[in-house]
Image: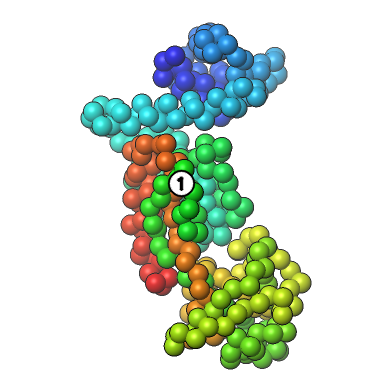
Amino acid sequence: MDTDTLRLFVAAAERLNISAAGRGLGLAPAMASARLAKLEHELGAELLHRTTRKVSLSQEGEAFLPYAREILAQAEAGRSVLGLNAAEPSGTLRFAAPSSFAQLHVMPLLPEFHVAYPKITLDLRLSDTRFDLIEGSFDLALRSAPLQDSSLRGRKLAEDRRVLCASPDYLARHGTPETPHDLVGHAFLAWVNTATRMLVHNDGSKAMLDPGQMICRTLFDDGASQRIATLAGAGLSINSMWSVAHEIAAGRLVHLLPHWRLDDSSVLWLIYPRSNVLTPKVRCFMDFLVSRCAETLLFNS
């Protein structure tokens, strides 16, 4: 089982086109098909279903694909250690991140990254719904949470401070809460998890933010939509400071209860499977995000 054939299989699985995958590796269609057939014979399983009209990934091929990618990553890392990859980093990097964060802090950086690393293709999967990093065969992901999964490793990107805010229009209509007790009865734009949250005052005293005592008529699973609804005056909401800092600075949102903080230990982590080695393409993307986002996320501290 040679790495060139594995690279061909991965390309064919991603494109669902054997001829195109072969051309990308300098192989004629017949040669590409023959190599894939030989790989399937070695493994004793059909990896790709072929018809005259289309190519699709078999169940066995879908199960084998993450391992093929891992073997290629390990080989690339080994060559890098030996100095055999002197050329600039290259390849496709699969990166998963919350769409709300990516829109504000990653998308504006893409032109700069592509100029710096023209041989890296970014396969971005952006959703506020969390992906399984290992099953999804991702090289890297951004998560905002304590790093508890023992199968993962991570590098801290920034603190993820959460704040309570509302629009001036909403506050003009419903009043501005001055204490946690004043939150009772206010409209609350909640995340899908409406658990009670602890608030801590600067003097150390504590209080509870209980969505059950507020009016929760809309639940969100997307941070950007929650921010837009808050700007429109639909209610109070808890947001990451990286999401609303510019809105607060411009006066479009008001930071409520500024002397209280949410008792929250969330941190923005760049994470990757513990079994993975850090290939050059992953390492340079991590270094790039840490260096560039650090400049724009200072307000989170």
Report the side of 298 relative to 105 (left or right).
Answer: left
Q: Of the residues shown, which amino acid type is indicated by label 1?
A: Ser
User: Where in the figure is residue 135, as x and y percent of width and height?
Assistant: 56, 37
- Provide the residue designation for mark 1: 150
**Viewer-nearest residue: 55 or 23:** 55
Q: How is the image coloured?
A: rainbow
Residue 272 in view (yes/no): yes
Mark 1: few, some, or many residues within 10 Å (few <14, many ≥20)?
A: few
- Give me the residue at 49% from left, 45% from top: 95
Q: Image quadrant for the C terminus?
A: bottom left
Compared with residue 219, is residue 280 higher up or lower down, i.e. above or below?
A: above
Tell me where residue 236 sits by quadrant: bottom right
Compared with residue 82, is residue 18 higher up or lower down, i.e. above or below?
A: above
- Give me the residue at 46% from left, 23% from top: 7
- Give me the residue at 73% from left, 73% from top: 216
Q: How many marks?
A: 1
SS for dot 1: loop
Compared with residue 186, is residue 293 higher up or lower down, i.e. above or below?
A: above
User: Where in the figure is residue 204, as x and y percent of width and height?
Assistant: 45, 84
Residue 255 in view (yes/no): no
Q: Residue furthest right?
A: 217
User: Where in the figure is residue 221, as x and y percent of width and height?
Assistant: 66, 60
- Give me the residue at 46% from left, 16% from top: 5
User: Where in the figure is residue 123, as x and y percent of width and height?
Assistant: 51, 41
Q: Image quadrant for the N terminus?
A: top left
Report the side of 219 relative to 73 (left or right).
Answer: right
**Viewer-nearest residue: 275 or 160:** 275
Compared with residue 257, is residue 243 higher up or lower down, i.e. above or below?
A: above
Q: Residue furthest left?
A: 83
